[in-house]
Image (cartoon, rainbow, N blue to C red):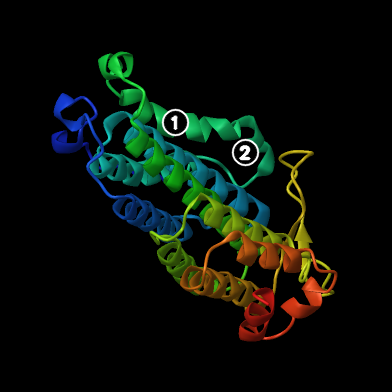
């Protein structure tokens, strides 16, 4: 498969100096909304574009693409301070990425000959490498306001990336109805992104949410199930085995993360509340509680 990206509109061109702003005139909510939209668009785009019958390959390609597109968004936003331009080129990077991987055979040996980083470099050459060099030289250190916005974006990205990686690694891409099932999970991730876009969430709150998310995603609830399927990817000796989870467990865990963020944002965010949550996260019976209903588990985690 080979897709061609649309020609760059001069209105969004990185060669157009008018696209480089002196300040970032967007709220944090606007920036997070745009990134969350970009993420769901990418996931919907990639699931329609890959048809390789190899679970490990699909997982690797999807997550490497997410990392690539996120980097494009971050870098262009940083240099241009123009959200529309960053979004536009990040969307274009979908096509560049698919154009590259479409030339890669399903055969793993062929894939290994084309270094995985080549796909990223192919995208970067057509996006961030186009950033005006004079602008780079004249770039001043970001203001405190811009730094806060970028830090919040990166914390948001860290949590969403953890959740998406968990979902993708636990998903079985060999199922007949893979596209419909995958899109169902995309909608859940979209809802989580919406919950994270909350002005009440400060640095400490982000750390608590991340710790909770990380604990859920690293829990071995399904890894030890007899009916889980492990698929090794021979692309790297350090690449872990991927255990496919039953869809209902993936769905439940994503629901739990969404419920946690919703309740956490409604409650009092303080060190006392965080301490209670952190204590329960390391409770010896955490996994047993996780087997309860989502509502019951969430009630317990806040006690």
Label 2 SS: helix
Residue 35 position within the rendered picture, expressed as x and y whole percent measured from the top left: 37, 51
For marks 1 and 2, give the one nearer the viewer: 1
Determine which residue is flagged by label 1.
122
Q: Where is residue 135 in the image (x, y as percent from the top left)?
A: 27, 19
The residue carrying pointer 2 sits among few (fewer than 14), some (14 to 19) or many (20 or more) residues within 10 Å by Cα, namely some
Q: Residue 38 carries which label?
A: none
Q: Quadrant of the C terminus?
A: bottom right
Q: Nearer the viewer, residue 1 or 50?
A: 50
Where residue 203 appears, as percent x and y from the top left, is 51, 50
Which residue does the image show at 63% across and 78% down from the upper left? 298
Q: Is 22 rendered above or below residue 179?
A: above
- Indicate the quadrant where residue 234 lies: top right
Task: Name the residue that disc number 2 marks.
Answer: 111
Locate residue 26 relative to residue 276 in the image: left or right: left
Q: Residue at x 74, y 44 (%)?
A: 239
Q: Earlier in the sequence, mark 1 or mark 2?
A: 2
Residue at 49 percent of width and 34 percent of height: 120
């Amino acid at each position: 498969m080979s897709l061609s990206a649309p020609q760059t509109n001069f209105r969004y061109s990185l060669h157009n100096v008018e696209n480089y702003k002196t300040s970032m005139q967007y709220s944090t909510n606007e920036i997070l909304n745009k990134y969350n939209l970009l993420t769901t668009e990418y996931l919907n785009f990639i699931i329609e574009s890959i048809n390789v019958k190899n679970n490990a390959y699909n997982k690797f390609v999807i997550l490497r693409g997410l990392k690539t597109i996120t980097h494009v968004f971050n870098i262009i936003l940083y240099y241009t301070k123009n959200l529309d331009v960053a979004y536009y080129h990040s969307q274009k990077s979908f096509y560049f990425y698919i154009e590259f991987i479409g030339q890669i055979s399903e055969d793993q040996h062929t894939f290994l000959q084309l270094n995985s980083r080549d796909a990223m470099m192919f995208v970067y050459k057509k996006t961030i490498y186009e950033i005006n060099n004079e602008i780079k030289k004249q770039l001043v250190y970001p203001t405190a306001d811009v730094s806060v916005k970028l830090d919040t974006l990166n914390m948001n990205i860290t949590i969403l990336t953890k959740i998406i990686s968990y979902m993708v690694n636990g998903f079985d891409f060999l199922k007949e109805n893979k596209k419909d099932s995958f899109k169902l999970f995309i909608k859940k991730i979209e809802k989580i992104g919406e919950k994270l876009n909350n002005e009440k969430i400060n640095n400490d709150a982000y750390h608590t949410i991340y710790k909770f998310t990380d604990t859920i995603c690293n829990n071995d609830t399904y890894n030890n199930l007899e009916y889980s399927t492990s698929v090794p990817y021979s692309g790297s000796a350090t690449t872990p085995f991927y255990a496919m989870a039953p869809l209902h467990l993936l769905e439940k865990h994503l629901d739990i993360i969404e419920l946690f963020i919703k309740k956490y944002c409604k409650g009092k965010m303080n060190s006392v509340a965080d301490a209670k949550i952190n204590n329960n996260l390391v409770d010896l019976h955490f996994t047993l509680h996780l087997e309860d209903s989502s509502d019951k588990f969430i009630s317990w985690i806040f006690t």
